[in-house]
């Protein structure tokens, strides 16, 4: 009888969805910043990304994976499993005076770090945080045992000098202590990698599983890279953006990631004809894209170092790895922003602040329209890869319509833990995401009834194969994504009742999550 009671006590103490004998997996979530849909080799790119390509070929690609359209909202959704407005981060980190746009994680959500720490995990974050500047929203106060975080949207890759001249500063924290980076510091992408590796080494011979959130700032502007990495790509983009888009488009079709019947969206209207540029202009644009490619190359190398550390710990077969981007490629033209400090030194160095602008952003988002901040596919489509040896079949490609809100419940299910109703005396907003565990393991997972977006007045809703989308102050458009995910055939006038149904759905969701009229809350 005593023996029986002892066994029952052990089972009660085990995570709720795992047997007493089953081992909780380690989980690594890797997030890139401003990386477009076609910017890695496994999604059609010419950029050298062997480590991500290996994860893809030995894991699963989800072709229709969505983010929230911009850095802060996507990070809030990833960390909480909620729509960004529900977490208090409907826009950026500025407080707009209403709950859905307060600019920092609220008290009615918890992070993956908090949830997995409760489930017995050692939790680590290294990289860009950007879900609140107030202490209550810092990583160390949101469930992370080890934390190296960039609190802001961007930074020089070589130091902590401000990017802006409007009073905003760049803040790095190790734990809760601010650190200052100087030009002798490691390149930021490498430092994010190094902190992750050091934190993993501390787990050697430990009994706890680990959760590692690696949030690279690359390839967000300012486009800055190590000279040896830039040299690999200089001169390789002199063919121009039109040919590169066509090349990526062709490869995406060959890889089976996009349908062979879809059309390539038109070149963005503000992008000039490459053939009409002079030699000096072509060289300038080639350099910009070479720097951008070098940033992705170095990020991939860092991912390889992290994976090698996991292998050296003997944990590769027990580690789930997820990779995605926070939004599409950017059209930011910081050389035209008077509130950005203008530095015109050697391109790619600490003495230069620049971006690759809409011409190359248009390439990054091949085959889709528009950019980061937009709710057309170019802004919200993310490359997504999951890898878990012996659990995910190598070379799997999924068409499931998925969203960054799905990552939290996926991690919870793998950890064998349940989402609480209350946390530290506060009621929690119920999760919006759906676990992808079944999808990863060859079963059909539950589908979303619909997915929704709102960012600075730009809106979208997807239900099944249909998507309604309206950029701020523009009329609603309607697309059949099964036949036209590149959004080249607006059928709003042909399907007015269907469009109105989707608009009404979006209005109901907006009330639920606290969306405000963007033109009145600024």
Image (spheres, grey):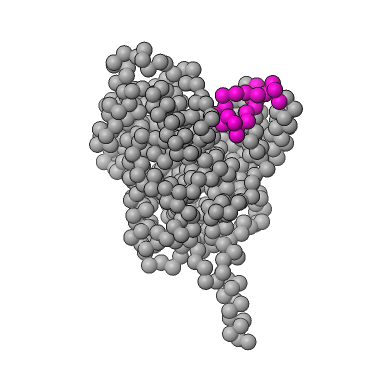
Q: Is residue 96 visible?
A: no
Residue 279, relative to residue 288: is it above or below? above
Is 190 left, or right, of 446 in this rendering?
Answer: left
Q: Is residue 487 magenta?
A: yes
Q: Residue at x 62, y 28 (%)?
A: 479
Residue 504 appears in which quarter of the rendering? top right
Q: How many marks?
A: 0
Residue 220 appears in which quarter of the rendering? top left
Residue 410: x percent and y percent? 56, 53
Q: Is residue 9 visible?
A: yes
Residue 31: x percent and y percent? 45, 44
Is 357 left, or right, of 347 in this rendering?
Answer: right
Q: Residue at x 39, y 44 (%)?
A: 53
Residue range highlighted in magenta: 475-495
Given residues 97 and 219, the one toward you in this image is 219
Residue 327, relative to residue 264: is it above or below? below
Q: Residue at x 52, y 44 (%)?
A: 62
Residue 394, relative to residue 13: is it above or below? above
What secondary structure predominates along the stretch shown in magenta? loop
Given residues 329 and 198, the one toward you in this image is 329
The quadrant of the rendering that contains the C terminus is top right
Q: Is residue 148 magenta?
A: no
Q: Residue at x 60, y 28 (%)?
A: 458
């Amino acid at each position: 009888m005593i023996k029986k009671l002892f066994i029952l006590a052990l089972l009660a103490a085990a995570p709720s969805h795992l047997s007493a004998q089953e081992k909780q997996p380690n989980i690594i979530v890797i997030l890139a910043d401003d990386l477009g849909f076609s910017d890695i080799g496994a999604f059609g790119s010419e950029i050298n990304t062997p480590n991500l390509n290996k994860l893809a070929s030995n894991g699963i690609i989800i072709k229709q994976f969505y983010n929230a359209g911009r850095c802060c909202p996507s990070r809030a959704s990833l960390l909480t499993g909620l729509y960004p407005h529900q977490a208090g981060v409907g826009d950026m980190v500025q407080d707009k005076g209403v709950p859905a746009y307060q600019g920092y994680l609220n008290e009615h959500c918890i992070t993956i770090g908090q949830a997995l720490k409760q489930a017995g995990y050692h939790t680590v974050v290294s990289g860009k945080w950007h879900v609140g500047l107030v202490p209550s929203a810092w990583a160390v106060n949101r469930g992370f045992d080890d934390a190296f975080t960039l609190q802001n949207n961007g930074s020089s890759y070589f130091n902590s000098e401000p990017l802006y001249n409007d009073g905003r500063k760049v803040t790095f924290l190790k734990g809760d202590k601010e650190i200052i980076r100087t030009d002798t510091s490691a390149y930021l992408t490498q430092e994010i990698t190094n902190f992750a590796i050091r934190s993993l080494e501390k787990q050697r011979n430990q009994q706890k599983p680990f959760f590692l959130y690696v949030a690279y700032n690359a390839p967000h502007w300012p486009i800055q890279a190590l000279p040896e990495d830039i040299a690999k790509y200089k001169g390789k983009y002199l063919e121009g953006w039109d040919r590169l888009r066509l090349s990526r488009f062709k490869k995406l079709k060959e890889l089976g990631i996009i349908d062979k019947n879809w059309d390539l969206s038109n070149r963005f209207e503000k992008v000039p004809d490459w053939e009409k540029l002079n030699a000096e202009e072509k060289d300038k644009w080639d350099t910009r894209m070479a720097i951008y490619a070098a940033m992705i190359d170095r990020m991939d190398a860092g991912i390889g170092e992290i994976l090698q550390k996991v292998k050296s710990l003997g944990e590769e077969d027990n580690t789930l790895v997820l990779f995605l981007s926070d939004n599409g490629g950017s059209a930011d033209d910081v050389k035209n922003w008077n509130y950005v400090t203008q530095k015109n030194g050697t391109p790619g160095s600490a003495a230069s602040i620049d971006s690759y602008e809409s011409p190359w952003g248009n390439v990054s988002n091949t085959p889709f329209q528009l950019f980061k901040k937009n709710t057309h596919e170019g802004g919200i489509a993310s490359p997504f890869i999951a890898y878990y040896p012996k659990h995910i079949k190598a070379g799997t490609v999924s068409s499931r319509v998925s969203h960054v809100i799905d990552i939290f419940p996926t991690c919870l299910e793998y950890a064998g833990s349940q989402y609480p109703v209350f946390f530290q005396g506060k009621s929690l907003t119920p999760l919006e995401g759906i676990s992808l565990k079944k999808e990863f393991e060859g079963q059909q997972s539950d589908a979303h009834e619909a997915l929704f977006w709102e960012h600075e007045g730009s809106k979208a809703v997807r239900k099944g194969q249909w998507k309604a989308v309206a950029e701020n102050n523009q009329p609603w458009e309607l697309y059949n994504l099964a036949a036209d995910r590149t959004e080249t055939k607006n059928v709003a006038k042909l399907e007015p009742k269907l469009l109105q149904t989707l608009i009404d759905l979006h209005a109901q969701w907006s009330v639920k999550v606290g969306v405000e009229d963007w033109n009145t809350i600024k």
